Amino acid sequence: MLKLALVFSFFAWNFFGASLFLINDSDWPLTAEIRGADGTVFDAVSLPPSGQKRWSTELSESQAQMPSEPAYSLTPFTVVWRCPQKGTYSVCSNVQPGATVTANSCQGNYRCTTPEELKEQRENIEPLFKQEEKSK
């Protein structure tokens, strides 16, 4: 029975391709960047809060361009959840095909900077640059 299961899983991998189920369980709109084992970026999927999507290497919904004999390694995947303004929300490594990946189950700081916070940071930094210019 185990041999039959292994044969079926090999067939399913080759027939359906590698897929992931992505769920943005954060309060931020995030982009899930899917990378291969060697760091090759396959795709980036934008999801609103509570958004979800099935990503696949073989289905037309994916933007990934995969040659029949790739010169790069597909798995395990790395999923990088990126914030809309700047920065990384979280990162999942060693993601196997068929896995469900949620933004809050990965390692990270689980926070994005709001536009107001970015504006405040810029306002706090600008005087420092002006002081530096005066001292030159």
Image (cartoon, rainbow, N blue to C red):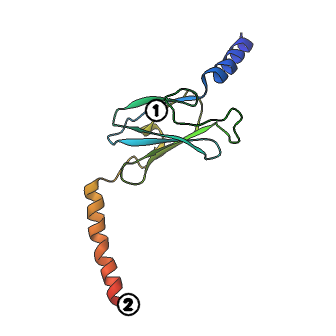
5 vs 126: above or below:
above
Q: Are marks 2 and 1 in contact (CB under 8 Å)?
A: no
Residue furthest right as drawn = 3
Secondary-structure class at tag 1: strand
Q: Residues within 10 Å of mark 1 (few under 14, many from 20)?
A: many
Rendered image quadrant of residue 119: bottom left
100 vs 87: above or below:
above
Q: Earlier in the sequence, mark 2 or mark 1?
A: 1
Secondary-structure class at tag 2: loop
Rendered image quadrant of residue 14: top right
64 vs 40: above or below:
above
Residue drawn 69% across the image and 21% down it: 10
Mark linked to residue 22: 1
Amino acid type of the residue tagged 2 in the rendering: Lys
Residue position for label 2: 136
Amino acid type of the residue tagged 1 in the rendering: Leu
